[in-house]
Image (cartoon, helix red, strand yellow):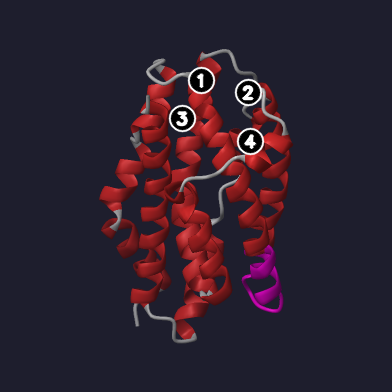
Amino acid sequence: MPSAQQVLTEITQALAATNEALRTHPYPQALARGELPLSALRDFVGHQYHVVRSDLRSMSLMVHRFADGPAYDFVYGLFQGEVSAQRSLLKLAARLGLNEQELERYEPQAGGFAYAANLALAAAHGSAAELACALYVNFQAWGENCQRLSAALRQRGFTAEDTAFLDAFVAHPPSEQQVLVLLRDGLDRGVTPRAIHRATRLFQAYEQLFWDTLLALGRAP
């Protein structure tokens, strides 16, 4: 049986091209250069409002499912971060002239909501090992893009309070050591490396779809 570190390393290597495409996605740079209007950011906030609300329910389920196991601290930490994110997202929305009633009425695109739908499915049916690996790898890419997007907005006059939603994902990434413990536990319980790889690959694919959707919306006439 491969070690937890081997599984994580092999998955990271196999997804290197996708991860690089995410780290260099043109959306943040297009905003920084003024190639997209600031109004395009409303689509980011509108989608994230629905994504965060869905993710909160998904993570609540994960906390319940894994309450008595080694994954509890990991998933509870993610849940706490999502609660904080919901509050700070409203500040970014206000900077763009959007209130919560308008966000509630915002209609997300399928490509922009696919990640949240996948998390809901994984939260209900996935193992702790699959979720831990997928979210760990995904949060690295998400955090880097949040950092790039925050820097782009600072160039266009946004304050630290405005970008708090984005900056929080940079400051508190999941712990690799926690993930390795959960991978080891999952492998010992019979979770296969293939299943862990599949879960991680799908999360990254839906993450890329999210950014592709936002870029297409921003460039639409």
Which residue is under mark 4? Answer: 165
Q: Earlier in the sequence, mark 2 or mark 4?
A: 2
- Left or right, 105 with respect to 148, comes to right
Give how far across and how far down residue 24 sits, in percent.
Answer: 33, 35
Which residue is under mark 2? Answer: 96
Work out whether residue 68 or residue 126 is closer to the camera in this orientation and state it.
Answer: 126
What is the CA distance from the residue labelled 3 to the residue labelled 2? 19 Å
Q: Which mark is residue 148?
A: 3
What is the crowding at mark 1: few (fewer than 14 residues within 10 Å), some, or many (at least 20)?
Answer: some
Which residue is under mark 1? Answer: 38
Amino acid type at circle 3 is Arg
- Left or right, 219 with respect to 110, comes to left
Q: Earlier in the sequence, mark 4 or mark 1?
A: 1
What is the CA distance from the residue labelled 2 to the residue labelled 1? 8 Å
Was residue 138 drawn as part of the magenta stretch in this picture? no
Work out whether residue 123 or residue 109 is closer to the camera in this orientation and state it.
Answer: 109
Q: Mark 2 against mark 4, which lies toward the viewer?
A: 2
* SS for callout 3: helix
* SS for callout 2: loop
Question: Residue at point 62% right, 56% down?
Answer: 54
Amino acid type at circle 2 is Leu
Give how far across and how far down residue 36 sits, in percent.
Answer: 41, 21
